[in-house]
Image: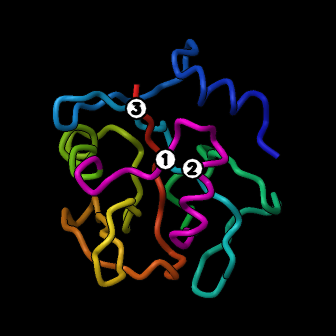
Amino acid sequence: MISMKLLEILNEIEVPNIMSYRIKVDGKTIIVAPEDVVIEPTSTIGHKRDRSYDLGYALYFPPEIGNQREIGMDWFKAKEACEKLGPKWRLPTIEELKAMHKQLYVKGKGNFKSGFYWSSSQRSYGPVLTMSFDKDFTYDFYKENDFLQVRPVRDI
């Protein structure tokens, strides 16, 4: 279950003392969530679980864990996580991820983690385009890979 505080933060992004990010992509402005969104992974193989509590299938922002968190999710869970935030939230396109890299990551903003981020952009033959912020390149992954991060966005 999503907490009321989280819904307030996400759906009323102008809440005082809450950092949010706005970026320009192809002439339009989008809002970038302040942190990665995480759900409990479907698999813990190869993942470091460094917290002593279990949130089950809860959706949450883990700012207290920061860079120590090394869990991710597959594309289906990433899409579902965005949808659970509300009707306006979605996976970013690959162009939006590139804009996040240029407008936020290289300036030290956005609290991005190392590793790859899911996009909504898919190849005609199956894989999804992803972006590595620390390596500054895109790569194709199949939707079942469960170690990628997700940073939701919404249109204004």
Q: Which residue is mark 2?
A: 82
The x, y position of residue 111, in whole percent, is 42, 44
The residue carrying pointer 3 sits among few (fewer than 14), some (14 to 19) or many (20 or more) residues within 10 Å by Cα, namely few
Q: Which residue is mark 1?
A: 90
Work out whether 107 lies above or below 120: above
Sequence-wise, which precedes: disc 3 or disc 1?
A: 1
Query: Which corner quadrant of the image does residue 38 belong to?
Result: bottom right
Q: Which mark is residue 155?
A: 3
Q: Which residues are magenta?
A: 72-96
Q: Quadrant of the C terminus?
A: top left
The x, y position of residue 60, in whole percent, is 68, 47
Query: Which corner quadrant of the image does residue 106 belong to?
Result: top left
Q: Does dot 1 land on a helix, a strand or a loop?
A: strand
Type of amino acid under label 3: Asp
Q: Nearer the viewer, residue 73 or 88?
A: 88
Type of amino acid under label 1: Arg
Sequence-wise, which precedes: disc 3 or disc 2?
A: 2
Q: Does dot 2 land on a helix, a strand or a loop?
A: helix
The residue carrying pointer 2 sits among few (fewer than 14), some (14 to 19) or many (20 or more) residues within 10 Å by Cα, namely many
Sequence-wise, which precedes: disc 2 or disc 1?
A: 2
Type of amino acid under label 2: Cys
